[in-house]
Amino acid sequence: MTAPVGLVVVSHSAALAAAAVELAREMAPGELPIEVAAGVADGGLGTDAVAIAGAIGAADTGSGVVVLMDLGSAVLSAELALELLDDPASRERVLLCPAPLVEGLVVAAVAASGGADRAEVAAEAAGALDGKLAQLAADEPAAPVTAAPETEALPAPAEQSEIVESFEVANPHGLHARPAARLVALVRELDGSGVRLRNATTGSPWAPATSLARVTTIGALRGHRVEVAASGERAQDVVDAVLELAARGFDETAAPGTAAPEPAPRLPASRPVPAVGSPRPGGPLPASPGVAIGPKRADVPAPVVVPDEPGSDPATEQGRLDAAIATVAGEIRDGRDTAARELGPAEAAIFDAHLLLLDDPDVVEEARAAVAAGASAPQAWSDATARAAAEFDALPDPYLAARAADVRAVAQQVLRTLVGVPDALADPDDGPPTVLVAADLTPARAAALDPARVAGVVLAGGSPTAHSAILLRARGVPAVLGAGPAILDVRDGTLLALDGAAGELLVDPEPDAVASFRDRAAAQAERELEARERSSAPAVTRDGVDVLVGANVGSPADATAAADAGADLVGLVRTEFLFLDRAAAPDVDEQEAAYRAVATALGGKRITLRTLDVGGDKPLPYLPLPAEANPFLGLRGIRLATSFPELLADQLLAMVRVAHDTPVSVMFPMVATVEELLAARRSLDEAIARDGRGTPPGLEVGIMVEVPAAALKAAAFVPHVDFFSIGTNDLTQYTLAAERGNPAVATVADPLDPGVLRLVDAVCRAAGEQVLVAVCGEAAADPLAAQLLVGLGVRELSVAAPAVAGVKQVVREVESARAAERAAAALTASGPAEVRR
C-alpha cells in the first residue's frame, strides 16, 4: 500500500498544536505521519522556519506533505521553510493549505488515513468549515473555499444498478465530526469512491461519502433519515457496511453519565410514513377540527432560478419589475382581506409587513438603479433584496434579524412572478378534493386555499397557534400538524385520512380504517347539520350548566356573520380595525358609529369591546413608539394605551356613549398588575364623567388574562372586575416562551400544555362564583379543549363566527361533572399529548 500523505502542523502555540493533533488522531487512528512545528525554543509563542523545514522532512514518506498553519506569520514562516529545503523534488511534494487549523487538520487526517493523495487531502482540509457554515448560516449557502468538487454538482442517483438504502441517525448529537469520520474512514477503506449520502429529512444535496467536509454539510441530526447510494459490483457490500456501522451508533462511546445512542433502524429507501394514531409525542397535533380523506398532494413551490442573461432596454425591464411588484401587492392584499374578514384586522397585520417591504424605497430604488445600468429585472430585484436580507441577518437583535425571512419571502414571490414560476401548486379544478401536505404553510397560502378543492391539510411542522393554523380553522379546513418530515416523502396520490380534532393521521390506510374514517366523517356531517339547525338555541351541558358561546369579530360585517351564526354575544371586538391602515387615529364620533354598527348587527346582545391592543407585532404608523429589543415584552396592550392617555380617553368615551343604549363590556388587554387595571378604571371613570349621564346600566369591566403573572394573582383582580377573558394565544406563548409564529418552536406552543391549563385553573378558582371566566383565544374552538375548559370552570367561549354552532353542540354533549374530572387529571399530565389521551 502506498504510504499516506504526511501532515505538518504549524502553530504559534505548542499546546494548541498538541491538542489539535490529539483530536485528529482520535478521528483517524492508525499510523499517520503528523509532525508539529509549534512555539519557539524558549517555550513562548511564535513560529520557527527551521523547525518547520525539519518537520516537513520528517513527515515526508514519499507521498508528499500538506502543511496547515494557524495565524498570519505562521504562513510566512512556512513559505520560508520551503525555501530552506535543499531538495527541489521535496519542495514540489509540499502543499501549504489555507484551511482552518483544527477543523482542517481533523479532515486532512481522515482523508490521508484513507489513502487520499496530496491534492485531495489539501482540498478536503480547505473545505472543512463547510459543515459549520451550513449549520450556522443555513439561510445563505457558504461560498466554496476551495476548488474541491461542489456538493451540488453531484447528480442524484439515477443508474439502474445503483443501490439506495437509508438509516436513521441515532447518535445524540447527530452525524457530527467523530461518527462522520468513522463513516468516511470505512467507505475509504472499502474503496467506495462512488458512494453518496443525502439527508432525506432536510432534502440536502448528495455528498461524496469519502469526504468528511462534505458529509458534515448534509447536517444530519438525531432522528434524521440519511440515504446511502452506491453502484458497482461491491455496491451492496459497501452499503451494508455503512448501515451496520450506523446501527452500532458509528461506534461512538457515550460520555460518562449519558446513555449510548440507540441502534439506528435500517429503513427502506422510500419508507412510507407509518400509520399514526392519536396522539403520539412529537406529533401529529390537532390544528383544525374535521375529518378529511383524499389523495396526498405536495404543496412544494418550484425553485426560482434567476436567468443568467443581460437585460433588454431599461424601460422594458423597469416595466416588468413594476408590473411584478404590483401583481404581488395585489396577491398580498387579497390574503390580507381574507385574514381581516375571517380573523380581524389585527391578525392580518403580518400581511401589512409584506406590503411595506414591497414599497421599501431603499430596495426598490436599488433595483431600479441596477435596471438602469443594464441588469435584467429578475437579477436587479434578486440582488437588492439579498442585500436587504443580509442587513437584517447582521443585526444583533434576534427579533429584528428574524425579519430577514420576511424579506426573502417577498423577494421570492416577486421573482416567481418575474420568471413565471408558480408560487405553489394550484388547487385542481377536477378530480376529488386532495389532502395538501407541506413542510409549513404561509398565512398567504392558507388564506388562498379553496376549501371546496382541499379536503384537509397535513403539515410536517407548524404550530396550533400560528396564523396559518388560525386561518385554516376559520376557513373550516381540517388539519393536523407536527406530522414530522417523513410525511413529505410520501408519494403524491397516496391516500391520507386525518382527524383534525383528535390529531390522527393515517397514511395509505387499510380499507377497514378508511371505512371507519368515512363513518366518522358522516357522523360529523350529521352533527354539523344538527348544530346549524340549533345554532340559535342556548348551549347547556347535559347536567344543566349554561355556557355562553360568543364570537370574536373585527368589523361590523363580522358582527353580522356572528349574529347569523347564532352567537349569544360578541365576546371580543378587536377595535384595532378602526386604527389600522390610516394616517391618524379615528375621532370619538367615528369610533362611536363603528361600535354602534356592531351593536346593531347583534340586535341588542352584549358586545365586549377590547381597548386598543397594538404594539409588538401590531404597530401603528402614527404612534411614535421607541425601538424595543423585544416588542412582545415591551410597550403593548394596556401599557401602550396608558402611554397615550388622549387616545385611550377618546376610545373609552365612545364606548361609554354606546353603553347607554346596548349592553357593553369594556375589556383591557395585556394587564399584568393591579396598578395597571386601577389606572385604566380611573380613565373609564373620567370618560363616564366626561359623557355626563352617569354610569351606563349593564356596563361591565374586565381584563384579558394573557400574562402568566395575571393568572397566578387573579384573586387580587377579582374585587375590581366583572369578568376575566383568557386569551389563550398569548398566554400560551408567554407561558412556554415560544412565539406562535416561530416554526423553530412551533410544536412547543400548545395551549393544551398542562402548564397553560394550570393557569386557566388558577383563574377559575380565584374567580369562583363572583366573576365570570371566558376564553376568547383559539383554544375555545378546539372541541377537546372546549370540554376541558368547561370542566375547569369556564362559562363563556368566544370563537370565530363559523365555529359558533359547532362549539355549542360540543357543550351540549358535555357532562360538566365528568368534564371536571378529566380536567383535573389533565392538570397533572406530563404534556399535551397525555392531556389529549
Image: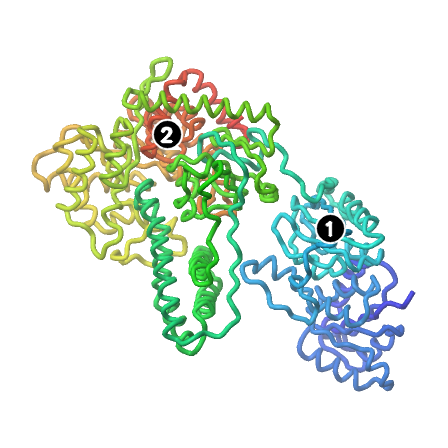
**Which residue is more in the foreground, 69 or 148?**
148
**Which residue is more in the foreground, 738 or 238?**
238
Residue 432 image point, x, y percent? 49, 36
Query: Which residue is under mark 2?
Result: 763
Residue 419 image point, x, y percent? 47, 62
SS at mark 2?
Answer: helix
State whether residue 313 is above or below residue 505.
Answer: below
**Which residue is more in the foreground, 650 or 222?**
222
**Residue at figure coordinates x 81%, y 48% from the top left:** 236
**Residue at figure coordinates x 15%, y 37% from the top left:** 656
Residue 499 image point, x, y percent? 50, 30
Closer to us: mark 1 or mark 2? Answer: 1
Q: Quadrant of the N terminus?
A: bottom right
SS at mark 1?
Answer: strand
Q: How many marks?
A: 2
CB within 8 Å, label 1 to label 2: no
**Which residue is more in the foreground, 146 or 159?**
159
- The outermost residue toward the top is 543
Residue 561, disc = none
Query: Which residue is under mark 1?
Result: 228
- The outermost residue toward the front is 430
**Residue at figure coordinates x 83%, y 62% from the top left:** 113
Q: Report which quarter residue 541 is drawn in.
A: top left
Q: Quadrant of the C terminus?
A: top right
Counting residues from the start of the chain, the first of labels 1 and 2 encountered is 1
Question: Given the image, on which type of amino acid does mark 1 rest?
Answer: Val
Cα–Cα span, label 1 and label 2:
54 Å
Crowd around label 2: few <14 · some 14–19 · many ≥20 (10 Å): many
